[in-house]
């Protein structure tokens, strides 16, 4: 196990910039490696420039027209000592969710920065003993790991420093390993999202077709209902009512009230009042349903009492019970209006 410090992981592409400037194009092109140290030099004539924080190259590349004052994160990590172990740098990068940490020398002067990629790289192959003491004494390692894209570097990834290159132990690209896993996971997520969206689009089309079919079926049922009600009403008007009128001429006055009530009930035979009353209050008695029908037709308590051969006081008692069972508790609520509304749902 090799003891590595922040000195071994200083970034090669550490650039000092004024707070009111923009990122140079050459540094934006190296956005994955560049770390910008932002300084306030407005009072440079009266003292040293003030270090404000670090800006990641990728962030500067996303907003090339913005000055560094607009790109600074709201919170900046505390500086790291030059001789601090890389394990400490790794722990702080993870805990503070930072891309880079500023590094100070023994005099407290900012001399560079360490990035997450370089720290992970050195901790990986340094722990395998593939970093020699002479290599650890080099002040900066720059862009530590690159993939061998041209012939002559062997089969595996290489560590680049200056004009020399050597393969890593085990032939692994240790910097791009976590990045590659992240890219693969991102790609899988995109594919899964695309699949889910396609399934949702298909289900939406099926739902639209089913809704259209149900609407058509409902329209057909409404047409059949209207036609059936018209046919029943015509039969009552042309067949039943003449017979009732003929009977009424040969019966007493009390019986004629019953025949009139029968005629009115036949006129509303297609009404759904009975079903709605059962749904609203299943405990209504048959006599109470009969009285509800007469109240709906506009008969007074006296007329209902005369038709049913009961006393008006009995009809009033029935009306109070009906209101109670239907939950009509307000004294201003009109039972006739409620029943007519119930019949027209």
Image (spheres, helix red, strand yellow):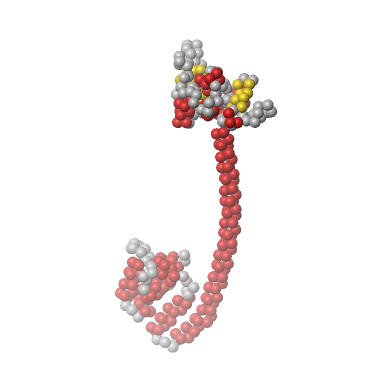
Position of residue 25 relative to residue 187, above or below, is above
Residue 34 relative to residue 339: left or right: right
Residue occupying the far right of the picture: 151
Residue 300 visible (yes or no): no
Position of residue 319 relative to residue 35, above or below, is below
Quarter of the view holding residue 18 = top right
Residue 171 x, y percent position in the rendering: 60, 31
**In the image shown, does 32 or 229 lie closer to the viewer?**
32
Residue 312 visible (yes or no): yes
Position of residue 66 relative to residue 315, above or below, is above
Residue 190 relative to residue 245: left or right: right
* Count of labels in the image: 0
Residue 299 x, y percent position in the rendering: 40, 73
Please give the name of the residue rendered at 45% of the width and 15% of the height, measured from the top-left corner: 106
Quarter of the view holding residue 227 = bottom right
Please give the name of the residue rendered at 59% of the width and 62% of the height, measured from the top-left corner: 213
Residue 54 relative to residue 252: left or right: right
**In the image shown, does 155 or 302 lie closer to the viewer?**
155
Residue 298 x, y percent position in the rendering: 41, 71
Please give the name of the residue rendered at 58% of the width and 67% of the height, measured from the top-left corner: 220
Residue occupying the far bottom of the picture: 250
**In the image shown, does 185 or 229 lie closer to the viewer?**
185
């Amino acid at each position: 196990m090799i003891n590595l410090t922040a000195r071994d992981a200083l970034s090669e592409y550490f650039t000092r910039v004024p707070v009111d400037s923009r990122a140079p194009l050459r540094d934006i092109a190296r956005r994955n490696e560049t770390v910008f140290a932002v300084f306030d030099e407005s009072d440079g004539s009266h003292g040293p420039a003030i270090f404000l924080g670090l800006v990641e190259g990728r962030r500067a590349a996303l907003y090339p027209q913005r000055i560094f004052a607009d790109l600074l994160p709201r919170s900046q990590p505390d500086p790291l000592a030059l001789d601090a172990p890389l394990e400490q740098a790794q722990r702080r990068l993870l805990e503070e969710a930072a891309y880079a940490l500023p590094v100070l020398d023994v005099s407290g002067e900012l001399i560079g920065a360490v990035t997450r990629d370089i720290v992970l790289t050195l901790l990986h192959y340094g722990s395998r003993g593939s970093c020699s003491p002479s290599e650890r004494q080099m002040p900066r390692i720059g862009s530590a790991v690159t993939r061998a894209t041209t012939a002559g570097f062997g089969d595996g990834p290489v560590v680049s420093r200056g004009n020399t290159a050597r393969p890593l132990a085990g032939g692994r690209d240790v910097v791009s390993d976590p990045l590659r896993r992240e890219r693969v996971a991102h790609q899988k997520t995109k594919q899964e999202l695309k699949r889910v969206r396609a399934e949702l689009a298909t289900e939406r089309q099926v739902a639209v077709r089913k809704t259209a079919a149900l609407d058509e079926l409902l329209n057909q049922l409404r047409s059949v209902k209207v036609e059936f009600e018209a046919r029943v009403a015509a039969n009552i008007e042309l067949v039943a009512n003449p017979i009732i009128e003929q009977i009424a001429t040969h019966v007493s006055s009390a019986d004629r009230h019953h025949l009139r009530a029968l005629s009115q009930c036949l006129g509303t035979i297609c009404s759904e009042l009975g079903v709605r009353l059962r749904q609203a209050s299943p405990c209504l008695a048959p006599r109470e349903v009969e009285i509800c029908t007469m109240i709906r037709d506009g008969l007074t308590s006296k007329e209902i009492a005369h038709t049913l051969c009961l006393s008006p006081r009995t009809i009033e008692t029935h009306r109070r019970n009906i209101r109670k069972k239907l939950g009509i508790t307000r004294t201003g609520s009109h039972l006739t209006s409620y029943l007519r509304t119930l019949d027209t749902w």
